[in-house]
Amino acid sequence: MTQFKFLAIVLTLAVMAPLSALAAEKNHHSVNITDPVTIGTTHLKPGTYSLEWQGPGPSVQVNFVRDGKTVATAPATFRTGDSQVVQDDVVMDRQASNESLKEIDIAHGKEALVFSQGGM
């Protein structure tokens, strides 16, 4: 009976460990922003940023990380299976007085992060 309890505990832990790892998994993508852009109230300078967000979406909080520091955080809608996404791309709203970030396309998964224009 003791061996059965031990085996049950080990099997339970073996099943639960991967599930907890998936729950804590961060999604990330590196993006090169070539022009100054505004996300919410934060102005981002041109350069390479690491984008990090948790969960499958559709609503996510995206951290813009540069040189190991989070320089901006913004809400976004995470879209998957977007057939219009054919290459990595940074889409800006050029109609605004200063260019605001509208969308970041991630080609390898046909995914997109769509940012609201309302702020952070």
Image (cartoon, rainbow, N blue to C red):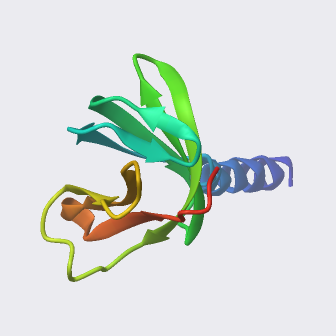
Where residue 119 appears, as percent x and y from the top left, is 62, 54
Q: Residue at x 28, y 60 (%)?
A: 91
Q: Residue at x 20, y 57 (%)?
A: 89
Name the one closer to the observer, 75 or 11. Answer: 75
Name the one closer to the observer, 83 or 9. Answer: 83
Q: Which residue in the rendered view is the most extreme toward the left? A: 86
Q: How many marks?
A: 0
> Where 49 sits versus 57, above or below?
above
Q: Residue at x 59, y 59 (%)?
A: 60
Res 58 quadrant in image = bottom right
Where residue 44 appears, as percent x and y from the top left, is 41, 33
Where residue 50 appears, as percent x and y from the top left, is 37, 35
Q: Which residue in the rendered view is the most extreme toward the front? A: 97
Res 65 quadrant in image = top left
Name the one closer to the observer, 21 or 103. Answer: 103
Q: Which residue in the rendered view is the most extreme toward the right? A: 1
> Where 15 sits versus 38, above or below?
below
Where residue 62 appears, as percent x and y from the top left, is 53, 48
Res 41 quadrant in image = top right
Q: Which residue in the rendered view is the most extreme toward the top? A: 67
Q: Residue at x 30, y 60 (%)?
A: 94
Instruction: Tell whether 97 sits left or right of 12.
Output: left
Q: Quadrant of the N terminus?
A: bottom right
